[in-house]
Image (tube, grey):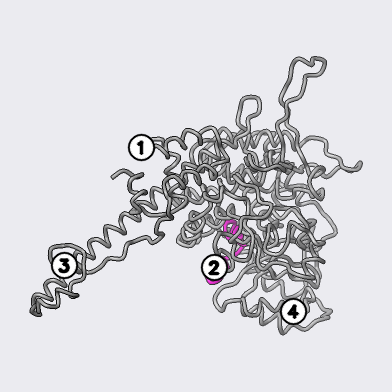
Amino acid sequence: MTTAEALLSGSALWNPTFQSDLFLKPKLTHSGVLSCTRRLKGLRGKRNKWEIDCRRKIYPVPPCRTRVKRLGCLSSDGLNGPLFSGESEKLNPSSADVNAKTHVSELIASEKLAAAAAKSEKALRVKADSLEDEAWELLNESIVNYCGSPVGTIAANDPTSTSILNYDQVFIRDFVPSAIAFLLKDDYDIVRNFLLNTLQLQSWEKTMDCHSPGQGLMPASFKVRTVPLDGDDSATEEVLDPDFGEAAIGRVAPVDSGLWWIILLRAYGKCSGDLSLQERVDVQTGMKMILKLCLADGFDMFPTLLVTDGSCMIDRRMGIHGHPLEIQALFHSALRCAREMLTPEDGSADLIRALNSRLLALSFHIREYYWLDMRKLNEIYRYKTEEYSFDAVNKFNIYPDQIPPWLVDWMPEKGGYLIGNLQPAHMDFRFFSLGNFWSIVSSLATSGQSHAILDLFEAKWVDLVADMPIKICYPALEDQEWRIVTGGDPKNTPWSYHNAGSWPTLLWQLTVACIKMNRPEIAEKAVKVAERRISKDRWPEYYDTKGARFIGKQSHLFQTWSIAGYLVAKLLLANPEKAKILINEEDSELVNAFSSLIPRGRKRSRKGVGVKQSYII
């Protein structure tokens, strides 16, 4: 029986995504499917409309959605039918006959169940394979070329969208999962070209309202434009047009771009074996410029990086200004990566010393003050306030009444997480997925904390994964709090977009974190949840509602980092060793330093001799 005949008979596994994958294969013999295949080839992005037409031709009545048919009892000759009903009662069989028939019935039933399960498993495997093929095709279609060479992928390739905005540009943070996917497939040129071209953009003059930011700032995105040559209207040339935030919505500065660039540079070297790129003078100079910008002296007393709202993946007003966890995790990761790649020379000595000092202070600060579990929560609940002393317990003057009611019931007995933000008299108790995942990947969190984060993620699966992974944060800002914090942002309504929307791209960060902690089954489970509908839904940017049941109201379809995030997760789960290109293992030097730092942290040192810079840690 052909696949199309099996579909018509209703015996095949019914799955909308599986069905749509079959429609894309021209070898099927059913005329309705084949004709639609020809039409589909020239209509990228309108896949669902034509699939619906096909389904109407093939399925006049919706087929049964059960995976395995219910098996009735079997007679001794192997035919389906009731064993003891109607006429069979007149036979008055002996107990031996009954036992023999029952044994045969159970044996045949078990064999049929095993065959049905194997068939179902094979169908799911075919579905997964075809889903990856579709994802690779879409990812390749999103590639942007500059002067004949690939330099990145656009944010979204949605032909149905009437509002492109800047989704036709190459974003540094968005390209990272695409770059990792290409690296894992041994396609190194596009990543190398991206790193070098964005490096050239770093030195461009950047001004907004007569003000220029510090040297070293990486652009948020760039676009390849075709412009006429000066003095010759008949000839054109391609140019890269960067956006450093001066054209972005809200004019937000892309603080995370430079951090992701350093992380990707290390991943490229580890995966390709081409260390000559990171050893180039211009690359070393660009890396140092990023580090100097991040390590510059300022008014802040904390080792964490002080940023404005909207300076990372959450690029709209969401109350994350100050010291958001996501930036700190990427900052720590970038420092660790840069320390590996900086070439030893006289000019780098001071920078490396400052880098090591910051790493120590930053690691201690996050592990000690951002960590939250049931024990720590109870400790905060009993805090005394207004402590004026050098050895105060409540150093940041956190008021116990700040503990939100939802957290008291939500915090599991086993598990914990790193809070979203910490400032004087303020703790952001929301769970931010990317910050916690990357704290595991970069070893900003301890091994015990990393396992506890994954324990909490499993315990709160219904809240953080639900129908589509993964909540960008939890819970949502609602009612008056939403109006005050977001300014009534119509895009960040509760359980939408950055306000606790669900983002499939976060699958790849979760996967790296799970592989590092030797718990890949958590990521595998999340990937299977995504595979149920992400292709059928046409690879949305994000999902709305508390259970992630709706495609986001303003979500772009065929979002590149949703596609790439899924591919990276699948590739890494198939080959976990490759995750090492992104992972920073625990630093033994930092561990040794913590042992001497913790006792000192309880008292104040008044000497200050030889200390160039101090932080509250």
Real-space Cα separation, disc 4 to disc 1, in angstroms: 74 Å
Q: Left or right: 543 with respect to 38?
A: right
Q: Which residue is mark 4?
A: 393
Compare residues 553 and 482 and report the one nearer the observer.
Answer: 553
Return the disc, 2 or 1, that comes first in the chain's sequence. Answer: 1
Return the disc, 4 or 1, that comes first in the chain's sequence. Answer: 1
Amino acid type at mark 2:
Trp
Q: Nearer the viewer, mark 2 or mark 3?
A: 3
Q: Identify the mark at residue 29; answer none if there is no mark.
A: 1
Query: Any magenta on residue 564?
Result: no
- Say which element carries label 4: loop
Return the disc, 2 or 3, that comes first in the chain's sequence. Answer: 3
Q: Nearer the viewer, mark 2 or mark 1?
A: 1
Q: Left or right: 311 with respect to 363?
A: right
- Say which element carries label 3: loop
Compare residues 108 and 366 and report the one nearer the observer.
Answer: 108
- Say which element carries label 2: helix
Q: Quadrant of the C terminus?
A: bottom right
Residue 240, relative to residue 577: is it above or below? above
Q: Residue furthest right?
A: 210
Real-space Cα separation, disc 4 to disc 3, in angstroms: 77 Å
Boundaries of the magenta span: 436-462
